[in-house]
């Protein structure tokens, strides 16, 4: 079974702090994604990576950056956390990129609260 | 900004066809339309995609208007297991540029 793990299930940070969210997958997937999910807004894609050191912006990259130094690990960084970044953050990985058999596998999520 | 707009929600009776619209009026010539769905808390799952021709597979049909400014995903015989959030996504062919829509929550009722 594919396993995607995220470093924390719950995180509380203060405004202005630098926040690191870590994601690790064990299936040698090329593609990894970071989403946030808020009530009534559905999934929103922040950043994704299709290879080591490669990254692409999604729909809402502002205020975030990412790092993919190793294939299995994809980190989301909030440079200076703000209250509007309070959300559920979901990491996903997939073998193919938008291929006909594509399914993305989610981690358990990190619920981040910024005070 | 996302390049697609979708209605936030819709209901469908079990066994009937569900028609999910998506507006992508600013789509460019090399952008594909993809549909994914998210069932409960699982990861997004591929349904179908197309460029300009209508497409059909075992899960659904995709109807793209001639001007490509909108499309409709058709689930021909909706079941309770089709209850999910459906995302319309545009993606530049052969590239890694893509944009999700806000999604339509489809509830199939018995």
Image (cartoon, coloured by chain):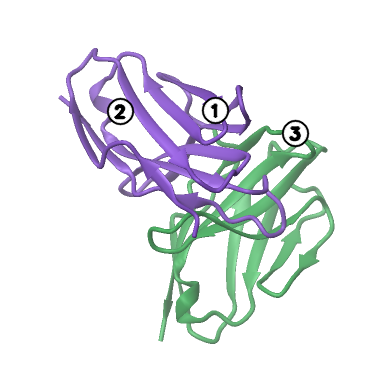
Element type where label 3 sits in the image: loop
Q: Position of residue A98 (x, y in %)?
A: 67, 48
Q: Chain of mark 1?
A: A
Residue located at (66% from left, 72% from top) = B59
In this picture, residue A24 sits left or right of residue B59: left
Residue located at (26% from left, 20% from top) = A82
Cα–Cα gap, marks 2 and 3: 29 Å
- The colour one sees for chain A in the rendered image is purple
In this picture, residue B30 sits left or right of residue A28: right
Q: Earlier in the sequence, mark 1 or mark 2?
A: 1
Q: Which residue is mark 2?
A: A85
Residue located at (47% from left, 29% from top) = A60
Instruction: Specify the label residue A70 is tagged with.
Output: 1
In this picture, residue B67 sits left or right of residue A16: right
- Does residue A22 show up? yes
- Which of the 4 image quarters holds residue A50? top right
In this picture, residue A99 sits left or right of residue B22: right
Q: Position of residue A103 (x, y in %)?
A: 58, 56
Q: Do callouts 3 and 1 point to residues on the same chain? A: no
- The colour one sees for chain B in the rendered image is green
A3, above or below A90, in the image: below
- Which of the 4 image quarters holds residue B35? bottom right
């Amino acid at each position: 079974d594919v396993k995607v793990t995220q470093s924390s299930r719950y995180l509380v940070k203060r405004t202005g702090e630098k926040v690191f969210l870590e994601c690790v997958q064990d299936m040698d997937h090329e593609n990894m994604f970071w989403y946030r999910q808020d009530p009534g807004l559905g999934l929103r894609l922040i950043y994704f990576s299709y290879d080591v050191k490669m990254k692409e912006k999604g729909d809402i990259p502002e205020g975030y950056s990412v790092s993919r130094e190793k294939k299995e690990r994809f980190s989301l960084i909030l440079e200076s956390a703000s209250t509007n970044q309070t959300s559920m953050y979901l990491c996903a990985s997939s073998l193919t990129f938008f291929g006909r058999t594509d399914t993305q596998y989610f981690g358990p999520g990190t619920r981040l609260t910024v005070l | 900004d996302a390049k697609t707009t979708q209605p936030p929600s819709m209901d469908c009776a079990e066994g009937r066809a569900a028609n999910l619209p998506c507006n992508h009026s600013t789509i460019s010539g090399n952008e594909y339309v993809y549909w994914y769905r998210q069932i409960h808390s699982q990861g997004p799952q591929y349904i179908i995609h197309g460029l300009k021709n209508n497409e059909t597979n075992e899960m659904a049909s995709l109807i793209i208007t001639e001007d490509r400014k909108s499309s409709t995903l058709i689930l021909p015989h909706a079941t309770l297991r089709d209850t999910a959030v459906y995302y319309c996504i545009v993606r530049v062919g052969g590239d890694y540029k893509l944009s999700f829509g806000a999604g339509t929550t489809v509830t199939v009722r018995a």
